[in-house]
Image (cartoon, helix red, strand yellow):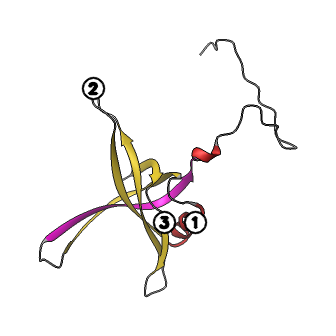
Amino acid sequence: MNIAILMGRLTADPELKTTSNGLSYCRFSVAIDRYSKGEDKKTDFINCVAWKQTAELISKWFSKGKMIAVQGSILTGSYTNKDGAKVYTTDVLVDKVHFCGDKSDKKSETAVPKAGEPRVTSIDEDLPF
């Protein structure tokens, strides 16, 4: 089974490109924090690629710094660079994408709900669960 689920922040604006056959795609990188017991936070940068409508959605609605969740599979490959050395690659082939909000989406607790939205109040009591 080859399933990858990641959530992190985009490291750059995703750029929509088109193959010579007319297929849309975009490559992007997601920064994901990793914590180890007794160590400081580390950040992994995971390369991703999306195709067709998924690529179009990502390039339209996501930008650098936005939180994103992706689901897909691990795709490995290799090529020979201009110096003749073999380079191995690992990407996440994105099947699904989810909006997760971002730093600028923080809402004030005193915000007035729009018409038709339920009013949410905070509870100061200890919850039984």
**94 vs 23: above or below:** above
Q: What amino acid is labelled 2 in the image?
A: Gly
Q: Please give the label number shown on residue 38.
A: 2
In the picture, measured across the screen, residue 103 lies left or right of residue 122, that is: left
In depth, the one of 127 and 31 nearer the eye is 31
Q: What amino acid is labelled 3 in the image?
A: Pro
Residue at 29% of width from left, 27% of height from top? Answer: 37
| Residue 70 in sight here | yes
Badge 1 element: helix
In the picture, measured across the screen, residue 20 lies left or right of residue 112, that is: left
x then y, percent, for residue 34: 35, 39
Mark 1 and mark 2 residues within 8 Å of each other at the beta carbon: no
Residue named by callout 1: 57
Of circles 1 and 3, which is in front?
3
Of circles 1 and 2, which is in front?
2
Judge the density around disc 3: few (<14), some (14-19), many (≥20) Cα neighbours within 10 Å: many
Residue at 47% of width from left, 61% of height from top? Answer: 95
Residue named by callout 3: 14
Mark 1 and mark 3 residues within 8 Å of each other at the beta carbon: no
| Residue 1 in sight here | no
Residue bounds of the magenta highlight: 86-100
* Residue 98 located within the stretch drawn in magenta: yes
- Majority secondary structure in the magenta region: strand
Badge 2 element: loop
x then y, percent, for residue 107: 69, 39
Q: Earlier in the sequence, mark 3 or mark 2?
A: 3
Label 3 and label 2: CA atoms lie apart by 35 Å
Q: What amino acid is labelled 1 in the image?
A: Leu
Badge 3 element: loop
